[in-house]
């Protein structure tokens, strides 16, 4: 709710149109100088693994349901910050015990003990997150939530940069709900036809870092996830923009990787017949689980330079390719190779294997 309100406020300041579907997904349209179909859409989810207070017990303890991927055995003793639905009130608590997971809803039962001595008493429907305040350094963004608020922020900043730079065609942004519990908002949005099927959609995620995909090596053109491979034509468009930036911006870095440490909503879009691909920031301490598997909940971390380069990349995709600015893609290179080899070998000699 609060991330959605922040998105609305950001768009209102700029006069961008925002619509909400019956599943709670937001669709933002950023105008270009010309009309017609939007050139591209970007998508990120608004949620992160967290808990909801479900009951207040007679002894003052709280019952809560945790949604999203975080191992229950690592939760006891974890410090929690509880918020009222409007964000105006807060309290502190600690996870006292963990119950069983409801396989149908995906909810993991928790018991919380209040530790704050002052302030409002938490009530049913309050939201709980790990008590890990934002920390910024010159190189890192450390927060209780990077996945996927870093993606949300990158989309808004990239669209703003392109819009202020006078992009020709309009662009779209989708912000979905309840991704961590099984792509719920995205799948419902597809069912409701919230997302135009004739506009290619690039899904932004924070994906667990891998041995060959490290923070600091640049944002990532994501070839696929652990479930599927994405649209190669749209991926080529991402790569073309990245190559253009490498020519124009000293020090710009990017990567092309298969990020199979998790699943992404680009798989849902591709499965529904959309042209979809992914971009990602390599993430440390995915879902607040320390990479070294020691200790309690930890800050998620992304590299600041990676995030800043991602914003430039998004803006470049919105602004479109400048003629002659980048090398041709594989299709053009392969056709050139075919012509050269055919001339050198002679067309007839290429068919010798079929002769009898």
Image (cartoon, grey):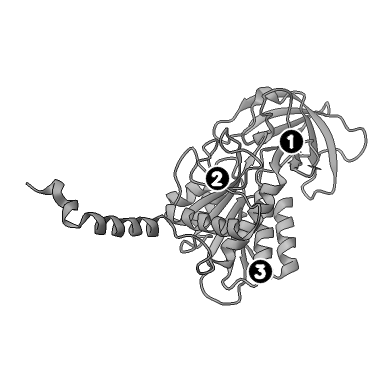
Dot 2, crowdedness within 10 Å: few (<14), some or many (≥20)?
A: some
Q: CA distance from mark 3 to mark 2?
A: 29 Å
Q: Which mark is residue 183?
A: 2
**Reading the chain from its start, which is encountered first: label 3 or label 2?**
3
**Reading the chain from its start, which is encountered first: label 1 or label 2?**
2
* Viewer-nearest residue: 101 or 306: 306
Q: Is residue 282 above or below residue 234?
A: above
Image point 80% across, 28% down: which residue?
94
Q: Which residue was labeled with disc 1?
A: 299
Image location of residue 63, percent across then percent down: 73, 31
* Viewer-nearest residue: 92 or 62: 92
- Residue 296 left/right relative to 286: right
Of tags 3 and 2, which is closer to the observer?
A: 3
Farthest bottom residue? 34
Q: Which mark is residue 163?
A: 3
- Residue 336 left/right relative to 206: left
Image location of residue 146, percent across then percent down: 69, 43
Q: Is residue 55 above or below residue 224?
A: above
């Amino acid at each position: 709710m609060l991330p959605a309100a922040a998105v609305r406020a950001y768009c209102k300041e700029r006069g961008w149109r925002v619509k909400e579907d019956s599943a709670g997904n937001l669709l933002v349209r950023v105008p270009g100088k010309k009309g017609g179909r939007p050139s591209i859409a970007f998508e990120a989810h608004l949620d992160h693994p967290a808990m909801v207070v479900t009951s207040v017990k007679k002894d003052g303890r709280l019952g809560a349901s945790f949604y999203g991927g975080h191992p229950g055995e690592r939760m006891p003793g974890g410090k929690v910050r509880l918020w009222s639905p409007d964000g105006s009130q807060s309290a502190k608590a600690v996870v006292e015990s963990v119950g069983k997971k409801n396989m149908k809803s995906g909810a993991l039962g928790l018991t919380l003990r209040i530790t704050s001595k002052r302030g409002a008493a938490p009530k049913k429907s309050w939201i709980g997150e790990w008590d890990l305040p934002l920390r910024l350094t010159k190189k890192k963004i450390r927060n209780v939530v990077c996945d996927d608020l870093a993606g949300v922020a990158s989309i808004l900043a990239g669209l703003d940069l392109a819009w202020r730079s006078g992009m020709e065609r309009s662009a779209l942004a989708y912000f979905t709900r309840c991704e961590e519990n099984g792509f719920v908002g995205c799948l419902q949005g597809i069912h409701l036809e919230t997302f135009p099927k004739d506009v290619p959609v690039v899904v932004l995620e924070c994906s667990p870092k891998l041995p060959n995909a490290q923070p600091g090596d640049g944002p990532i053109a994501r070839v696929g996830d652990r479930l599927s491979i994405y649209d190669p034509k749209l991926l080529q468009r991402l790569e073309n923009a990245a190559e253009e930036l490498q020519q124009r911006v000293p020090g710009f870095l990017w990567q092309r990787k298969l990020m199979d440490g998790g699943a992404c909503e680009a798989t849902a879009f591709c499965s529904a017949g959309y042209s979809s691909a992914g971009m990602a920031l390599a993430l440390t301490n995915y879902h607040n689980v320390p990479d070294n598997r020691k200790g309690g909940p930890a800050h998620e971390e992304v590299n600041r330079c990676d995030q800043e380069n991602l914003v430039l990349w998004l803006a470049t995709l919105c602004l479109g390719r400048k003629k002659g600015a980048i090398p041709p893609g594989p299709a053009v290179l392969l056709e050139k190779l075919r012509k050269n080899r055919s001339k050198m070998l002679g067309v007839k000699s290429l068919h010798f294997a079929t002769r009898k």
